[in-house]
Image: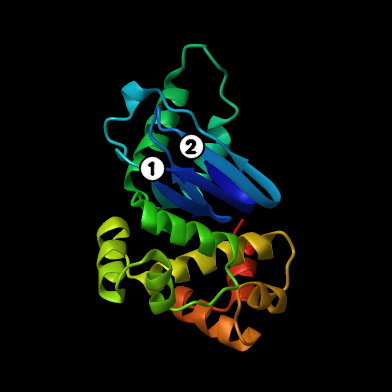
Amino acid sequence: MLSLSGVATCEADGSVWLVPPQSALFVPGETRHRVAVSGNIEGYAVFIDPAECRVLPAECVAITVTPLLRELIIRSAQLAVNLPQDDTEHHLTALLLNEIATAPTGGLHLPMPTDPRLRSIFTSMMENPAHRGTIEFWARHAGLSERTLARVVAAETGMSFGRWRQQLNLILAMQWMAAGASVQQVAVDLGYESAGSFVTMFRKALGTSPARYMSNHSDEL
């Protein structure tokens, strides 16, 4: 799934994945998933025969789309369906598979726990992201000690409690900004005391300001 404009999120493999412009998400065959979009979305979905997936990832993974990979995906959308490929088309699809297999990976994803106590906490945080409760607050909410909550969160998600909440904030912020929300409004909706404190968090996490990040991704298309 390649996003050219707008921001898509995909729930799969117990995680929520963010797919901003100039990025893609690889979802292995037969993986149950759900996609939601923010803003005016434009993109492509590439369906790959499972027999050709031997060199591709075995699990969901975010992909940084190179200019070559983007053009290969767009060109492959013009191929005839259910017709034999000629030599040029065969080479094109082989190169496409190789580019997917070797593309840089990473991106923002939000692991979702299976432990019902954590699931309840994280669901509450997603439904009310402006609530800035501390880990101590949420530990009491779940009837756990702070140390136990931190240990279970790390075991279930591979992240610290603070890092998980930061990832949630970043994903929600990009969805809202793609839909037209201002940085000031996003900061308020995420419970930050000021737009400056939100921008500082965003810059530390992604290396640039929210406005520049969204602009750069759109300008690269």
Display colour scheme: rainbow
Dot 2 and dot 1 residues touching (CB under 8 Å): yes
For the residue labelled by badge 1, is the local secondary structure a helix, a strand or a loop? Answer: loop
Q: Nearer the viewer, residue 126 or 172?
A: 126
Q: Is residue 58 left or right of residue 40?
A: left
Whether residue 111 can be seen here: no
The residue lying at 58 percent from left, 38 percent from top is 44
Please provide percent x and percent y for residue 122: 46, 60
Q: Which amino acid is tagged 2? A: His
Q: On residue 5, which mark appears?
A: none
Pointer 1 local density, CA inside 10 Å: few below 14, some 14–19, many at least 20: some
Q: Which residue is mark 2?
A: 33
* Residue placed furthest toward the top: 83
Please provide percent x and percent y for residue 144: 32, 68
Q: On residue 13, which mark appears?
A: 1
The residue lying at 42 percent from left, 51 percent from top is 62
